[in-house]
């Protein structure tokens, strides 16, 4: 999708569709909004009677199409809801809703009237970023295995008009930067959507190597023999039942500043999770190809970080394995030794994500001594039970880090919610025969006991755990409740969030 700006008013655009945001009437005041005049003129005066008859109300998700009076195309209004609750994410959702709604209507070019999306605390810069996100992410479809794909919007123009023409240079910079981030999300979705017969641990490692060549990252891949020498018993145990051996992949971005902080980002990369010997039920098992979403998000984050030249040094770690019940599979009752020397008692082979992460977290903590560690993992069903399909669970040992991530979430519209971690949860993961156990006898606080387990492997460093089990992907059941920019399948959750965090002015960790 291509983007450009135009200093002229939206009515001058020759695009197939011109789009304006529309707010709801406030209180009992149902007069036609004064800001409606340009849209009404462009639609030949049809908007005013439609507003008065309440055929259009400005409610969220309301998309209304009018044919332009000059016969050159269509003018679309998209509801933004109440002015008082308007945010940049409202604009992001609205843009995606329009792009989706016109996909089958023959439109290839789109113009957005910027002034109609600038309101209150949402500045022109925030608005154009949100509109880019909404158009790009909302226009995505995974089409690799389709013989015929329906085309959608190909070119988008931001119409600056009299209100914002003087800001064109600045806004072009905002658009270019956000486009790189949004395209990194699409790239991430494409990989995360691949089935397990294609996206094996080895092929994820190949994707990392290719990325390193493209954007200048140092990439190191540890195969099963090297992992055995390193003592990474966790990832080897989980991958032991598959014909596709595990891989630990490390990507290094040097950073945009000579003495910036070092941030480690670690992702769970289970390319398919059958549950192992503790096998999952058949319904929806096909969705377990998305269990690699954390590791694939690490790829997307490193891609965007390198292209945008973010200030911090970033170390990405992908813990990749396939969890199958083969002859070499690990078993309930086994005890495995991890990279940092701690032993894990295995009670449930379907609690495998924390086991592969144990080696990745311990490795990056010991070898790179980062200022902070952030992990992303589709770790527990308990996260979905607690927070639903749209919100990720955040557990952190560092208040500064947690606050900065929450602030980044507010900007990107990727919701996260901080959860507690107490000695009660730590006690539950203690083992009678080893240092820790990967499951518990009582089914309570599953998201938090998983975090308590992971804490044993971060070496006391500032750490944040993001359980993205809910928002990492959508299906036909959950899709209707998600924002329009989250398409069916992989969402690429976490890429925009972590890039926003890395671009933030958060100080070096203490």
Image (spheres, grey):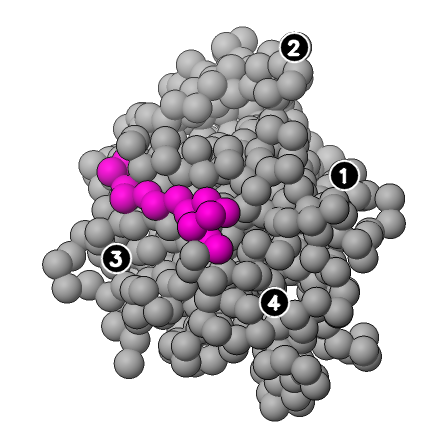
| First-in-chain label (2 vs 3) | 2
Question: How far is disc 4 from disc 1 in space, using C-alphas?
Answer: 28 Å
| First-in-chain label (3 vs 4) | 3
Q: Please give the name of the residue rendered at 58% of the width and 74% of the height, measured from the top-left corner.
A: 343
Of tags 4 and 2, the one toward the viewer is 4
Residues at discs 1 and 3 in contact (Cβ within 8 Å): no
| First-in-chain label (2 vs 1) | 2
Compare residues 196 and 287 and report the one nearer the observer: 196
Residues at discs 3 and 4 in contact (Cβ within 8 Å): no
Question: How far is disc 2 from disc 1 in space, using C-alphas?
Answer: 23 Å
* Percent of width and height locating residue 359: 49, 62
Helix, strand or loop for disc 2: loop
Helix, strand or loop for disc 4: strand
Q: Please give the name of the residue rendered at 60% of the width and 29% of the height, measured from the top-left corner.
A: 198
Q: Give the residue pinned by disc 3.
A: 313
The magenta segment is: 215-228
Using a 10 Å C-alpha cutoff, classify the residue at mark 3 as few (fewer than 14 neighbours), some (14 to 19) or many (20 or more): many
* Percent of width and height locating residue 75: 55, 24
| First-in-chain label (1 vs 3) | 1
Q: How many marks?
A: 4
Q: Give the residue pinned by disc 4.
A: 336
Residue 150, above or below 23: above
Question: How far is disc 3 from disc 4 in space, using C-alphas?
Answer: 32 Å
Q: Is residue 145 visible?
A: yes
Q: Please give the name of the residue rendered at 37% of the width and 35% of the height, measured from the top-left corner.
A: 209
Question: How far is disc 4 from disc 2 in space, using C-alphas?
Answer: 48 Å
Of tags 3 and 4, the one toward the viewer is 4
Q: Please give the name of the residue rendered at 35% of the width and 69% of the height, measured from the top-left corner.
A: 366
Helix, strand or loop for disc 3: strand
């Amino acid at each position: 999708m291509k983007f450009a700006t135009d200093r002229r008013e939206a009515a001058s655009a020759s695009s197939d569709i011109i789009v304006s945001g529309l707010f709801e009437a406030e209180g009992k005041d149902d007069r036609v909004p004064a800001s409606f005049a340009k849209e009404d003129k462009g639609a030949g005066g049809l908007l005013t009677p439609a507003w008065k008859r309440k055929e259009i109300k400005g409610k969220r998700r309301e998309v209304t199409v009018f044919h332009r009076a000059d016969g050159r195309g269509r003018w679309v209004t998209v509801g933004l809801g109440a002015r008082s609750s308007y945010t940049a994410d409202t604009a992001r959702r609205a843009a995606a809703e329009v792009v989706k709604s016109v996909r089958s209507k023959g439109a290839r070019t789109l113009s957005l009237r910027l002034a109609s999306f600038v309101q209150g605390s949402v500045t022109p810069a925030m608005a154009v970023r949100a509109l880019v996100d909404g158009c790009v992410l909302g226009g995505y479809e995974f089409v690799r295995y389709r013989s015929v794909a329906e085309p959608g919007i190909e070119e988008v123009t931001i119409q600056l008009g009299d209100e914002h023409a003087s800001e064109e240079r600045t806004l072009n910079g905002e658009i270019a930067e956000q486009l790189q981030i949004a395209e990194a999300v699409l790239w991430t979705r494409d990989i995360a959507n691949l089935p397990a017969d294609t996206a094996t641990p080895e092929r994820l490692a190949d994707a990392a190597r290719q990325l390193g060549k493209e954007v200048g990252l140092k990439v190191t891949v540890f195969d099963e023999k090297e992992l055995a020498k390193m003592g990474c018993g966790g990832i080897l145990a989980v991958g032991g039942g598959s014909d596709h051996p595990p891989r630990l992949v490390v990507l290094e971005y040097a950073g945009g500043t000579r003495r910036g902080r070092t941030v480690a980002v670690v992702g769970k990369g289970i390319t398919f999770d059958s549950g192992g010997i503790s096998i999952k039920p058949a319904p929806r098992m096909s969705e377990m190809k998305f269990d690699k979403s954390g590791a694939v998000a690490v790829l997307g984050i490193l891609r965007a970080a390198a292209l945008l030249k973010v200030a911090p040094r970033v170390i990405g770690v992908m813990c990749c394995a396939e969890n199958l019940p083969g002859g070499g599979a690990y078993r309930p009752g086994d005890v495995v030794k991890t990279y940092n020397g701690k032993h894990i008692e295995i009670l449930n082979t379907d609690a495998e994500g924390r086991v592969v992460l144990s080696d990745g977290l311990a490795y990056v903590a010991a070898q790179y001594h980062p200022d902070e560690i952030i992990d992303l993992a589709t770790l527990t069903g308990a996260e979905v039970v607690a927070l639903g399909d749209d919100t990720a669970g955040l557990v952190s040992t560092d208040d500064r880090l947690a606050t900065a991530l929450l602030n980044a979430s507010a900007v990107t519209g990727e919701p996260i919610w901080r959860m507690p971690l107490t000695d009660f949860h730590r006690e539950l993961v203690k083992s009678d025969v080893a240092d820790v156990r990967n499951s518990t006898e009582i089914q309570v606080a599953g998201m938090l006991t998983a975090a308590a387990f992971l804490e044993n492997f971060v070496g006391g460093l500032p750490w944040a755990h993001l359980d993205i089990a809910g928002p990492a992907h959508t299906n036909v059941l959950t899709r209707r409740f998600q924002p329009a920019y989250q398409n069916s399948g992989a969402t690429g959750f976490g890429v925009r969030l972590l890039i926003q965090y890395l671009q933030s002015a958060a100080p070096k960790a203490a």
